[in-house]
Image (cartoon, helix red, strand yellow):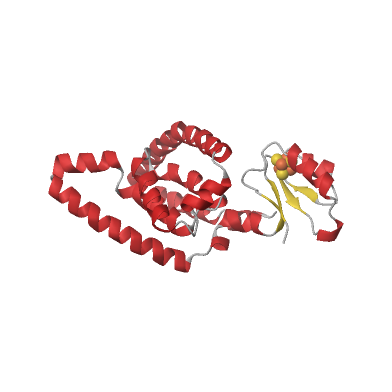
Amino acid sequence: MTILEKLKKNAFLSLVVLAYVFMFIFKWQMGIESVKNSLYYIKEMLLIMPVIFVLTALLDLWVPKEKIIRYLGKEAGAKGTVLSFVIGSVSAGPIYAAFPMCVMLHKKGASIKNIVIILSSWAVIKIPMLLNEAKFLGFKFMAIRWVLTVGAVVVFSWITSRIIKDEDLPVESKVALGLSINEDACMGCGICAEEQPELFEMDGRKARVKVYNDENIDRERLNKTMELCPVESIKYVED
Ligand code: SF4
């Protein structure tokens, strides 16, 4: 992979680095402050995210897919909406902690609408936040803002679900068709490429799927390879 391709693949990170470089050139002091703030958030994330990943993995393991589809899926209706508000409102921690959990829920069948409700209520109507709001700004202020926010979240989640489809989400698209590898999870051990070189190859520190024909896939061997992958990043979804 060339440097240009790497920059393209990490376009957002490249932009952030570029912004820092400009800041240090033109506004040295602002650059220092930004680095301090970034380090603060990185430290916070390093403390919180491992716990979130463990909780998400446990939820993934313990909550069956059928339950997620029934209570948070497209057909869940009003009960799904209420449950999504409850999940988001009783949560704790910063909003970025919600993203891995929402990815897992979506993967198991939660609808886009309910994912938006969980994220939105997590961000703006968490119970500890409401209690503090009532304490500092008064109960009336908190109650009116809560009612209006809930209404707005319902409307915006519906609009989002009309615009964004399941296949638009990156994780869904990676597992939607045929054989795929979750590159973010792949740790580059090379087991898959050793086990089935006709299907997988290494590209630097990541594995990738070769061009293949569905009919030639040996499912038994593929299942074994999938089991051997230490981070379960290989998926095969039949059309
Ligand atoms: S076995 Fe899994 S982790 Fe190892 S290289 Fe293949 S996809 Fe990546």
Instruction: Name the residue at 36% across, 63% down.
Output: 156
Left or right: where 202 falls relative to 55:
right
Q: In the rendering, at what x and y percent does residue 88 appear?
A: 37, 46
Q: In the rendering, at what x and y percent does residue 34 appear?
A: 37, 44
Q: Is residue 158 above or below residue 145?
A: below
Q: Is residue 199 above or below residue 58?
A: below
Q: Quadrant of the N terminus?
A: bottom right
Instruction: Name the residue at 27% across, 38% down.
Output: 128
The answer to whether residue 26 is seen in the rendering is: no
Q: Quadrant of the C terminus?
A: bottom right
Q: In the rendering, at what x and y percent does residue 158 appear?
A: 40, 64
Name the residue nearer the viewer: 113 or 80.
80
Left or right: where 120 falls relative to 191:
left
The answer to whether residue 186 is seen in the rendering is: yes
Ligand 1 appears in which quadrant?
top right
Q: Where, by quadrant of the figure, is residue 92 drawn?
A: top left
Instruction: Name the residue at 47% across, 52% down.
Output: 72
Name the residue nearer the viewer: 225 or 192.
225
Name the residue nearer the viewer: 195 or 63.
63
Instruction: Name the residue at 29% across, 60% down.
Output: 151
Q: Is residue 137 above or below residue 40?
A: below
Left or right: where 159 falls relative to 164:
left
Q: In the rendering, at what x and y percent does residue 40 appear?
A: 39, 36
Q: Where, by quadrant of the figure, is residue 63 drawn?
A: top right
Question: Number of marks in the image?
Answer: 0
